[in-house]
Image (spheres, rainbow, N blue to C red):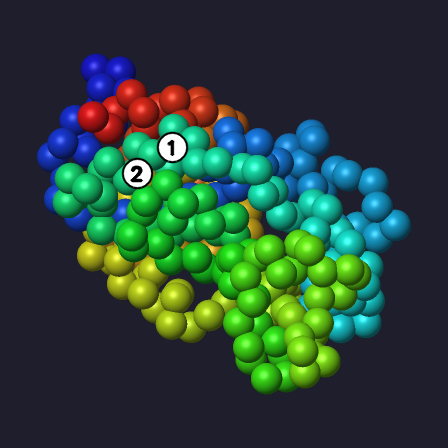
Amino acid sequence: MSEIDTLRQWIQESERIVFFGGAGVSTESGIPDFRSADGLYNQKYKFPPETIISHSFYRENPEEFFRFYKDRMIYEDAKPNAAHKALVRLEEQGKLKAIVTQNIDGLHQMAGSKHVLEIHGSIMRNHCEKCHTFYDLDYVVESEGIPRCECGGIVKPDVVLYEEELDDVTVSEALYQIEQADMLIVGGTSLVVYPAAGLIDYYKGNKLVLINLSATQRDDVADLVVKGKIGEILDQVIE
């Protein structure tokens, strides 16, 4: 039986599926990932992208941070792709219990998924650091330079920067869902970013599936490895 057939059969047999996804889920929507040849980490800027999207750089150079953030981390025209839509179908069937995503683009919710745990936050949520007023994405995009609240405070995106802690509540819920899962599908991630990548260690079942274009560091511990584009693969196996 082929990997695709095995994947399809496992999905049919499972009742509590959790999907754990990374940047590769959104590349088919035209959002570049971080580590590929044309990914963010290989772009040329005055500072390395890892430096720019760190908490200390944000504090010291907010103007440079927001120039990069608006230019390289917001893709307003991006639309959900076949992977996002297939996961909606799986949730509607009652099989998919949660999506744990490293992505900040909001595409899972745009596609219609209900239970999405965004462990690195979301560009869709922004709050004033002084008075905590909520602002939407458009406010940040349309602001000149540093987005500021009426009170004068900086409007900070709800995204987890380097040097910042993950949200405890979101991580706890993600761990719970992964521990309870009878099948864990991991897709579009190289599994090198910690602590996020460590979450899959909490899975206790025997249907750990890795779907990715290239090999990952955890292929050897997976029960099934499927190479290819995640959108094409999920679209084939989820009716």
> Which quarter of the rendering shows the C terminus?
top left
Question: Residue 76 or 39: which is nearer the viewer?
Answer: 76
Q: Amino acid at mark 2?
A: Leu
Q: Are marks 1 and 2 in contact (CB under 8 Å)?
A: yes
Quarter of the image holding residue 85? top left
Which residue: 39% across, 65% down?
A: 171
Which residue: 52% across, 41% down?
A: 23
Q: Which percent across, then down, holds residue 43?
A: 77, 39
Q: Is residue 7 visible?
A: yes
Q: Which percent across, then down, holds residue 228?
A: 44, 22
Residue 206: mark: none
- Identify the secondary structure beneath mark 1: helix
Q: Name the residue tied to disc 2.
A: 87
Q: Amino acid at mark 1?
A: Ala
Crowd band around label 1 with a 10 angstrom C-alpha radius: few (<14), some (14–19), many (20+) = many
* Left or right side of 173 for 42: right
- Identify the secondary structure beneath mark 2: helix
Residue 83: mark: 1
Which residue: 16% across, 26% down?
A: 9
